[in-house]
Amino acid sequence: MKQLFHVFLVSILAVSLSACGSSEPETSEAEQPETKEEEPVPEEPVITWEEEFEEGKKLLEAQNYEGAIEAFTRAIDIDDQEAPVFIRRGDAYVLVEQLQRAWDDYETAAKIDENNPEAYLGMADVQIRRNEFDEALELLGSAPSAVKADAQVAAKAEEMKSGTYMDSSSNIRRADEYDTDGNLVFINVYEFEGNRRTGWTNYTVENGVESLYEKCFVTYGSNGLPEKHEFYDANGAFRSSQTMEYDGNGLETRRNVYDNNGEFVAYYLNYYDENGNEIKYEGYLADGTLMMYETSEYDSSGRRISSSVYDGAGNLTGTKTYDY
């Protein structure tokens, strides 16, 4: 009897324990808490050198030269074997007057693509801005045949051979003058800050020998136009000065000349066509006696193609042609 009671008690305890273990209701598979999946990290967009190059060109066109340099530099950091990028960065460096960096970029472009005419034109431009005129002409003359055959390179070389050395901003950096027999007799070398001409140096040439003739320094007025020129001889002694007058369009109409004592000695009058091209200027002594005059001709694009100088009696004393 005790044994049966013991079995009965064990059974009751087992049922009781089983009931305690299942006090929380079972959940179905559908009711299981969802596991939140981690969202993928978005990949950074890949920027190509072409995109940075295009951005640099836009900034260059907008005259944001520093921004353009930064964009071109990023393009080069991505791919340093693209000659056009170095050329455009060189252009930007020129415009902020960092000529050595510009030279380095043009030279690198020429090493990447030895037949790239823009690279050679860029190097020649730097040399012209440095007054390295002979070196610029020699550079284009020794360029690869494919470069020399380029129309722009050929035209630039001919321009320099004619005695006109113009930079990429269309500023004349050197202009040579010839007598009626075609002999070089005068060299004019101009200095600039940005696109503002600040002065020039003149040399006479006799039997192929150049000699310093005079230097000129330019002072600008509040209107942004030159108001005074001061000339000094080869020894640095003050020689003379000039003052300028302008019309409402900013075209110079008269220039007054004074000697080293400040005495008025001569004046020049300028004449223009309807497009603002100077077609003639006349030089007079203070008493009104005609000393000389010069006439100029222009092509349909408004570029001067020739000029002729005459003495007071109307005799031709010199000519000059301009090649572009």
Image: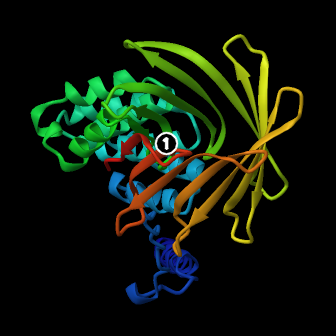
Residue 115 vertical position relative to residue 255 in the rendered view, above or below: above
Q: Residue at x 38, y 43 (%)?
A: 320
5 w.r.t. 166: above or below: below
Quadrant of residue 302 within the rendered picture: bottom left
- Determine if residue 322 is in view: yes
Q: Pick the residue in front: 116 or 29.
A: 116
Residue shown at 38% from the left, 12% from the top: 207
x and y percent of residue 306 in the render?
A: 38, 51
Which corner quadrant of the image does residue 214 belong to?
top right
Residue 307 drawn at (x, y percent): 42, 50
Q: Position of residue 68 (x, y in %)?
A: 51, 51
Seen from the viewer's position, the closer of residues 96 and 112 is 96
Residue 52 versus residue 244: which sits nearer the camera?
244
Secondary structure under tag 1 reads strand
Q: Label 1, on which residue?
A: 172
- Residue placed most toward the observer, 6 or 209: 209
Above or below, 139 relative to 59: above
Indicate how the structure is coloured in the image: rainbow
